[in-house]
Image: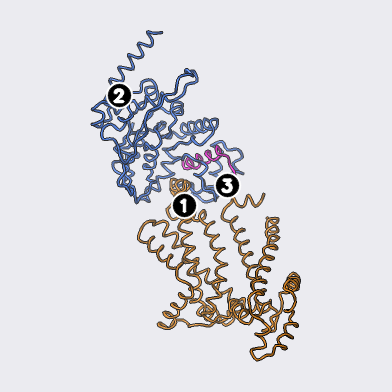
Amino acid sequence: MKAYIIQRLLSLIPVMFVVAVVVFFIIHLTPGDPAAVILGPDASVEEVNHLREEMGLNLPIHEQFWNWITKVVQGDLGWSIYMDKPVLQAFLENLAPTLSLALMAQIIAILISIPAGIIAATKRGTLTDQTFMIVSLLGISVPNFLLALLLVLVFAINFALLPVAGFQPLSNGILPHLQYLILPAFALGAIQAALIARVTRSSMLDVLHANYIKTARSKGVKKKVVIFKHALKNAFIPILTVIGQTFGQLIAGAVVIETVFNIPGIGQLIINAIMRRDFEVIQGTILLIAFSYVIINLIVDLLYGFFDPRVRLSAKN
Amino acid sequence: MEPLLKLNQLKTIFSTEKGMVTAVDDVSFEVYAGEMVGLVGESGCGKSVTSESILQLLNEKTTNYEGEILYKGMNLLSLSEEQMREIRGNEISMIFQDPMSSLNPVYTIGNQIAEAIMIHQKVGKKEANLRAIEMLRLTGIPSPEKRVHEYPHELSGGMRQRVMIALALSCKPQLLIADEPTTALDVTIQSQILELIQELREELDMGVILITHDLGVVAEVCTRVIVMYLGQIIEEADVKTLFKSPLHPYTKGLLKSIPHLDGDRTQKLNVIKGVVPSLQDVPSGCRFAPRCDFATEQCRENPPELLELVNGQKVRCWNYEHILREAKDHAVTTSENK
């Protein structure tokens, strides 16, 4: 088990390196000059060139990459020229809202989708099943920013039940925190819910036809126990995979939702950094997001063993 | 003596997209306590559906039952789902064909056996675990105290089938339905499992329905045989009679298609010509007529009834007397030739 985790952590290195290379070159090869952005439209060419030299932007691109990557390896993600603070600090300051948002979206998604998927599977072919699947198709098809705007229109403007936008940190109390978060989390979680519901349904359908389900029924086990004990645990591996993968999409989706609801999270940090051509912030933040994505997948892989003893055994070997 | 189980004109009808399909048609037979009855036929003849109908394990939304399934005189088809759960695993148990897929891969075998015990015998987890170990020992699994904590994938096929038997017998049922319990196993393991079922049948005085397509197995362990074809019983007799003087051409064909060690090696093995028709277009006369060497006009037009002869043998054939006579003549001529 330990060896497996170490092996997985080591495999992080090439992944992170590739991410670093891609992010760095995409940003540096897109037009836009940070020096010019910082100094504004009134700055003279000499002033801009001077700043470029100071920032090392006049060096050949591979040298710039080398300078950056050697710092990153030492744990220094760089300095935000615009905010005038370390990238890591900026990231951590913006992390809490995004984490809250993503977690809550994921929780909402799971709470809706898994029961829905199970019900649809056990009532296969009925009106209930079809209704659930049509709703989930809608959930996948509607872009989340549109859903966000619709939710705001209905719940915040028409019924005035919830705030239109903004964010309250957890330190201001749990209730205001949730009040501000519920609409964005719902908008963000809808696609996830739809995806997870569909996977839950098909995975449950597979499992419900398995012979061991018949065995369980022939023992005299109650139907509910057959579904929740015997079937669900077997059906959970694909569900877990989707949950893990969609968590990555949640972070991407958070960028859009944070903009719509004006939440000071990682999404806003990246968007602002892109507008300001704050190179090191973009690179550092994306590197950290990629890192967390890989770590989440590692956790998901380790959780497989919890649900399926066969995976546990192969991990031991 | 009253039979333990009595099927009375059981019909199992599936509603499918292509319409109603009667997978089990007018099946009646009895099983007595302590007796092992063989239910034989090709794949798709309705033997598994019959057995799953007894416990009502088929999809209730698409399955309709007609007739009666009398267990100790009580009609199982009139019971509620809750009452039926009391029967399943407790009074009537089942063993399935494929031990690889019949055990839940994510729970230990001890857990799976103990679950049945906890449901029916209302005992705690600890006690149920002890009884599970006892059952595993009874089925000949070595060091059962350790094995209870293992998962199905850690056991061999034969061991898993023993676990299935332990599971099925954990609540000392009166009737065991074994649906091809040895088909997926090696030949050596097969006989061990059959012996085990035999022993436990004697020990617990259970009635056993052994579903199989292997007549060799039937000859070895059963006292009575029921032959099914396309959802109907076509012949029923005690083992000796059936093997000595089968009456239905289909049974004859089945018996002839078993290879014999001392047989002539240059001779081709007998094959029943044609294929089993689909349940959707059942022949209007005798269901076996299109494949039968003896079929007459009458066979093709009118479905024969299941007739009971004086010796208790039952057969569904218009021409069985003719066939019987011919067989006797044949026996006489061959003995004359010798």
In this rendering, does residue B121 appear at all? no
Chain coloured orange: which letter?
A: A
Q: Residue furthest bottom?
A: A42
> From what the image shows, is residue B74 above or below residue B319?
below
B168 is within the stretch colored magenta:
yes
Q: Chain of mark 1?
A: A
The image shows residue A94 at horizontal and vertical percentages of: 62, 78
Q: Disc 1 marks which residue?
A: A206
- Identified by mark 2, the residue type is Phe
At 41% from the left and 42% from the top, the residue drawn is B91
| Same chain assignment for discs 2 and 3 | yes
> From what the image shows, is residue B139 above or below residue A61?
above
> From what the image shows, is residue B215 above or below residue A47?
above
| Same chain assignment for discs 1 and 3 | no
The image shows residue A230 at horizontal and vertical percentages of: 49, 52
| Same chain assignment for discs 2 and 1 | no
Q: Secondary structure at mark 1?
A: helix
Q: Nearer the viewer, mark 1 or mark 3?
A: 1
Q: Disc 2 marks which residue?
A: B294
**Which span is picked out in magenta?**
B152-171
Q: Residue furthest front?
A: A45
A181 is within the stretch colored magenta:
no
Q: Which of the numbered marks, if any, corresponds to residue B151? A: 3
**Where is the N terminus of chain B found, in terms of image quarters?**
top left
Give the Cα separation between the discs numbered 2 and 1. Answer: 46 Å
Q: Nearer the viewer, mark 2 or mark 3?
A: 2
Residue B280 lies in quadrant: top left
Q: Chain of mark 2?
A: B
Q: Are marks 2 and 1 in contact (CB under 8 Å)?
A: no
